[in-house]
């Protein structure tokens, strides 16, 4: 999974909120938010943010399990 930028991480963390709410919080234009979401999808080779969130959760679970095994 390719790394996403800090700005993309902010948008990713607020997925599920409306674009207007994300705009208000991060003071970004709508087109910027949409471009950052599109960039996340391309980097993670997913077709929608729901799929991207699922990949993130799967990766997090795998990392956590690996830490437990090596402890």
Image (cartoon, grey):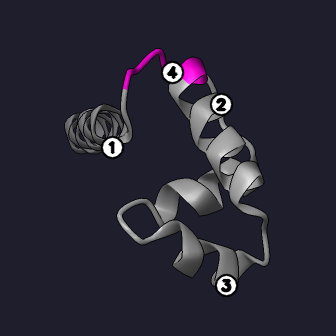
Residue shown at 35% from the left, 64% from the top: 16
Which one is earlier in the sequence, the residue at label 2 or at label 1?
2
* Residue 31: x %, y % from top left: 73, 50
Q: CA distance from mark 1 to mark 3?
A: 22 Å
Image quadrant in which you'd find residue 27: bottom right
Given contact means CB atoms under 8 Å apart, are the residues at marks 2 and 3 in contact?
Answer: no
Q: CA distance from mark 4 to mark 2?
A: 13 Å
Which one is earlier in the sequence, the residue at label 1 or at label 3?
3
The residue carrying mark 2 is 39
**Front residue (pair 15, 1):** 15
Q: Which mark identifies residue 1?
A: 4
Which one is earlier in the sequence, the residue at label 1 or at label 4?
4
Q: CA distance from mark 2 to mark 3?
A: 21 Å
Q: Is residue 15 magenta?
A: no
* Residue 70: x %, y % from top left: 29, 35
The residue mark sitting in front, 1 or 3, is: 3
45 shown above or below 41 = above
Q: Which residues are magenta?
A: 42-47
**What element does badge 3 sit on?**
helix
Left or right side of 12 for 63? left
Q: Is residue 46 magenta?
A: yes
Q: CA distance from mark 1 to mark 4?
A: 12 Å
Left or right side of 65 for 59? right
Q: Which mark identifies residue 5?
A: none
**What element does badge 2 sit on?**
helix
């Amino acid at each position: 999974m390719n790394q996403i930028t800090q700005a993309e991480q902010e948008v990713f963390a607020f997925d599920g909120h409306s674009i207007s709410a994300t705009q208000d919080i991060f003071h970004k234009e709508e087109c910027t938010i949409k471009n950052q979401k599109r960039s996340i999808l391309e980097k993670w080779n997913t077709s929608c943010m729901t799929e991207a969130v699922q990949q993130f959760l799967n990766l997090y679970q795998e990392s956590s399990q690996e830490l437990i095994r090596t402890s």
